[in-house]
Amino acid sequence: MVTNAASFGRSGVHDYILIRASGIILACYTLFLLGFVLTSSPLTYDAWQGLFSALPMKVFTLLALVAVLVHAWIGVWQVLTDYIKPLMLRGFLQFVFVVLVLVYLLAGISIVWEV
């Protein structure tokens, strides 16, 4: 059995399912927000605040945020493994991106739960 040291046990099927699932979540979130914008006659701050203060919307928003981050991580990982051949450079760039993703996640959680 041949293994790739850069894969760290990753599975193409696993990535495929994650990409598709995150795409479905993001499509549903986008359609929901589009429907809200189109059906809210006076789109005011109070309407937005009311929408995002509800617990189901907070959970849906965080789910969409995680979906964006998973989608981005898999895409960046694929690009880095395809085009960055030096292992140390690729590892460093992946580390930087993971830190950035965690910062975005923590900022998103903080923003969503403070509404």
Image (tube, rainbow, N blue to C red):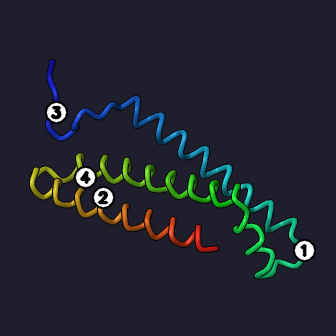
Q: Earlier in the sequence, mark 3 or mark 1?
A: 3
Residue at horizontal 51%, vertical 70%?
Answer: 110
Nearer the camera: disc 2 or disc 4? 2
Which of the 4 quarters of the picture holds residue 106? bottom left
Nearer the camera: disc 3 or disc 2? 2
Q: Earlier in the sequence, mark 4 or mark 1?
A: 1
Q: Residue furthest top?
A: 1
Tell me, yes or no, whether the two marked residues, 2 and 1, touch with CB atoms within 8 Å. Answer: no
Nearer the camera: disc 4 or disc 1? 1
Task: Determine the CA span between mark 4 and mark 3.
Answer: 14 Å
Residue at horizontal 80%, vertical 64%?
Answer: 36
SS category of the residue bearing label 1: loop
In this rendering, is residue 71 above or below 16?
below
Decide which of 65, 111 is in the foreground and name it: 111
Which numbered marker is on residue 4? 3
Residue at image mark 2: 98
